[in-house]
Amino acid sequence: MRTDLVSEPGDATRPNEDFAGVGLPASGQGGCVILLDGVTPPATETGCLHSVPWFTARLGGALTELTVSGRDLTLAEILSRAIERTAGAHARTCELSHPRTPQATVVLARWGAETVEYLVLSDSALLLRSPRGEVTTVLDDRLARLPRSALATDALVDATLRNKEGGFFTAAADPSVAARAVTGTVPRRAVGALAALTDGATRWTETFRQGDWTALFDVIEKEGARALVDRVRRLEAADREERAYLGRSKTHDDATVVYADLS
């Protein structure tokens, strides 16, 4: 099995809020990919003493351990337990009910001899490529389906949409959110390779429209994860002034790509 992982902060003066890892059990049977995109709060008030990188490191570490060792657990159960464990690490010092408490998007993929399991929560992406080359995209598109008017102010998002019915869900402090994730299982023989990406990397397709998901996967597979992130950075820099594509979005975002060739 071959893997390729690149994670780059959007701003060199700020910590990277993404987390990514590849887990390989000591038995040598199967493996897993873990990807988190920490949600940057627009204001300093979060009700928490800890930073987003602290949260993603804690949650990512718990997910890695549980995904590798908990073969009897579903990925939703693993996410639920990891959120509970992470919340327990700062429940006494922080107001975890605050809508801006540290939180993250989640992608999990786990494979064994017979199956590939997946879980996606919020707007990171998982791509599955068959041995014949077809690419299946696994997305949780609830945030993308919301009208732009509903996202007009951060206060409105916090009050009515964030981790609410009719809105969208992220991994924060409530373990029950794991039941909201997009999950599934496919035969191992149907997946030759997979890639997990934060939305800072999927900009190549979703924001700049440089190619579809198959073309994006081709870049990763043929040129490497680094090449995709470099392409995104060049596109962002070119749009810095005109903002024809980025709109109100920040010029650069943390960008992470994890690729695994299962063949």
Image (cartoon, rainbow, N blue to C red):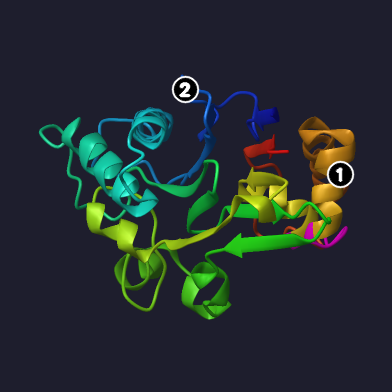
- Marks counted in the figure total 2
**Viewer-closest of 64 and 131:** 131
Magenta segment, prevailing SS (helix, strand or loop)? loop
Residue bearing the label numbered 1: 219
Residue bearing the label numbered 2: 27
* Mark 2 burial class by Cα count in 10 Å: few <14, some 14-19, many 20+: few
**Rendered location of residue 250, percent (x, y):** 65, 48
Q: Quadrant of the C terminus?
A: top right
Which amino acid type is shown beneath numbered disc 1? Val
Q: Which residues are magenta?
A: 206-213
Mark 1 touches mark 2? (CB < 8 Å) = no
* 110 relative to 22, above or below: below
> Farthest left residue?
92
* 146 relative to 117, above or below: below
Residue 237 visible in the displayed image: no
Residue displayed at 29% across by 50% down: 77
* 26 relative to 68, above or below: above
Residue displayed at 36% across by 34% down: 55
Residue displayed at 77% across by 35% down: 225
Residue 158 visible in the displayed image: yes
SS for dot 1: helix
**Rendered location of residue 200, percent (x, y):** 66, 46
First in sequence, mark 1 or 2: give its number: 2
Q: Alpha-carbon distance for marks 1 and 2?
A: 32 Å
**Viewer-closest of 169 and 262:** 262
